Image (spheres, helix red, strand yellow):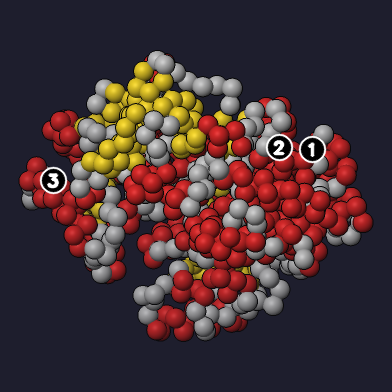
Amino acid sequence: MNPLETPVEYLKGVGPAKGELLKKELNIKVFGDLLLYYPFRYIDKSKVYLIRDIDSDIAYIQLKGRLLNLTELGTGSAKRLTGLLEDASGKIELVWFQGINWWKEKLKIGENYVVFGKPNLFNGKYNITHPDMDTVEEDLLYNEPLQPYYPTTEKLKQKGLSGKTFGKIVRNALLQTYNHIQENLSASIIEENKFLSRPDTLVNIHFPKSTALLEKARQRLKFEELFFIQLELFRIKYIRNEKSVGRVFDKIGSNFMTFYESYLPFELTNAQKKVIKEIRKDLATGKQMNRLLQGDVGSGKTLVALMSILIAIDNNCQACIMAPTEILATQHYRNIEKFLKDMPVNVMLLTGSTKKKEREVIHAGLKNGELNILIGTHALIEEGVVFKNLGLVVIDEQHRFGVEQRARLWAKSEISPHILVMTATPIPRTLAMTVYGDLEVSVIDELPPGRKPIKTVHFFERDRLKVFKFMKDQISEGRQIYVVYPIINESNKLDLKDLMDGFDTISRYFPLPEYQISIVHGQLKAAEKESEMKRFLEKKTQIMVATTVIEVGVDVPNATVMIIENAERFGLSQLHQLRGRVGRGGSQSYCILMTSYKLTADGKKRIETMVKSTDGFEIAEMDLRLRGPGDIQGTQQSGLIGLRMADIVRDEDVLKRARATAANLLKTDPELTQHENQMMVKFLQTQNKQWGQIS
Ligand code: ADP
Ligand code: MG
């Protein structure tokens, strides 16, 4: 049997009990898993701190000293074990809250220990909670110049696998498997990048012979991780390109030209022109288009979609636009109808509330081809909606639609329609390369001229009256205002308390009949929501108090103020999305971020970023830095969660190199059939199996 696949309990130093725990707590099942369980720091054994010199609680440090005493204190959850450690320079307290009995058993008063941990400043004094404690003899057993230190758990520590002793079983695993570790990069890629071999990479990531070799090992592991994701994405794209047949829209006909020359009410921005060109090119290739269109709110994506649709119609095809909510679908419908009112193009709207009679008209029009454009919600993917000749599908706000639902739209046509996905949630470049690496990406990075940048300010509760005064001024100038509350769970009545309290306060300061206020939240019925929105849209109300249900897409150009309550509770991209609800008309717009006095470091950074920047990409970049990729849409499917070494933000240069290498490889060996590339194919296959298990 390949030792890499031997169950971990058979490894020297493990056994059934630890084996079970390793599986349960760290998902380490076989010897090979241990090799991929990397240390999270390295202790420079030559550095021993003196207790007197401890002056910050930032870094992990190593101490050597004698244990003077050991005392059990407190009861219940405050129960703890404390010990006093002394070296030539002073004394420091050590504290354990867990595994007290185990530590009492292990530690001997009067004995000398090598101690490793992170100092905390507590009541003006430093202590160390849950340090690693090894006797001097134990410490000698694994005396590396740079000693690996592993993430571990309390239960494993109590079984003798501390951050430090963990290295012992990893060493055993390496000894057993070294000769079986397979290379996973071709000789030419290794050569070109001057990488260590794979076995030596793994040796040096665990037991580095020097900091230089550690760095080399890191570089290779980062590259590997990013390279195989890119290779997989390129292969998906390649296969789709080879297999897919798309309609050829090579005609630019009278609809497109008439619209462009006679009805387009403004000049296209350069960014819009560029993107339309990209789409036109795609549509003419005979392959199915799969394109993601990114652009900040208000950058004019809808117009680009409409012009693409006109190309489809000029080539005798139908098109549809699918939006995530009825409000949005209706808005698209109104806009597009207005744009096309003097043109021989039929547009209809299909949503959950479309009446049966009208539905029948729509179904008939779709079947006989007289209906050119259908705009709607999920209703578009219902049975009974059958197109004669569906050529282009536009999906607005992509994250609300699952892959599955999109697939059902494809099925509506024997030749897959072209797909254009529009999103106003900018995705940082590095992430887009990874998550959407299989889609073509177009970016509109320019707003139509004449827009005034939104002014964003940060206020605390003490500024409340000032804010109310400002609201009154804006209303007296005929403007409208949003006030948004964070609601964690829209279906939980208790969660609505903040919103309801806020509504009461606002109602007192803005009394009837002079002021009218709309309120929208998840507990309202769809019809109520619609009617409240409508009152606001028709300027019958001046203030809209709402939860984030209004986040996506509502378009009320007369609304110029967005007030976000408890703004610190929102993520950056959500704040940006909300802010995008104003600034849609020609007047100066404002975004007011209200927060409590207490802000976390992250919260502060988010607010500062919003005040400083209106650039969606810059904000998305910061969001990624603050949150990591795990929380960001789409990362689950992409293998990104499998990243152990690479950091999608910090390792942009490695990502670029990995991507270029993957592209190059497929250029010379598109099917990966060459002998020298087989090890990469094999590795990709095992990795895909693992990703499959994760998701
Ligand atoms: P998005 O869908 O990207 O949020 P829209 O397509 O809804 O943006 O455009 C926002 C507003 O800007 C609309 O009122 C639209 O008519 C207008 N608009 C779009 N392109 C231009 C342009 N090139 N010049 C002026 N106004 C434009
Ligand atoms: Mg839009």
| Residue 464 spot, x, y in % from top left | 16, 34
**In the figure, is residue 446 to the left or right of 589?**
right
Q: Distance of mark 3 from mark 2, alpha carbons?
A: 63 Å
Q: Mark 1 or mark 2, which is nearer the start of the sequence? A: 1
**In the figure, is residue 85 to the left or right of 46?**
left
Q: Distance of mark 3 from mark 1, alpha carbons?
A: 66 Å
- Disc 3 marks a residue whose amino acid type is Ile
Check disc 1: other Cα within 10 Å, few if <14, some if 14-19, many if 20+: some
Q: Can residue 452 be seen in this view?
A: no
Residue at the (67%, 37%) spot, across then down: 207
Instruction: Please state which of residues 675 and 15 is positioned toward the viewer in this rendering.
Output: 15
- Disc 1 marks a residue whose amino acid type is Leu
Looking at the rendered structure, the secondary structure element under dot 3 is helix
**In the figure, is residue 583 to the left or right of 633?**
left
Q: Mark 2 touching mark 1, by CB under 8 A?
A: yes
Instruction: Please state which of residues 27 and 176 is positioned toward the viewer in this rendering.
Output: 176
* Residue behind mark 1: 196
Residue at the (45%, 68%) spot, across then down: 377
**In the figure, is residue 372 to the left or right of 317?**
left
- Disc 2 marks a residue whose amino acid type is Asn
| Residue 472 spot, x, y in % from top left | 16, 37
Q: Distance of mark 2 from mark 1, alpha carbons?
A: 9 Å
Dividing the picture into quadrants, the one containing residue 122 is top left
* Residue behind mark 3: 506
Viewer-nearest of discs 3 and 2: 2
Q: Residue 204: which disc?
A: 2
Q: Is mark 3 within 8 Å of ligand 1?
A: no
Dividing the picture into quadrants, the one containing residue 538 is bottom left
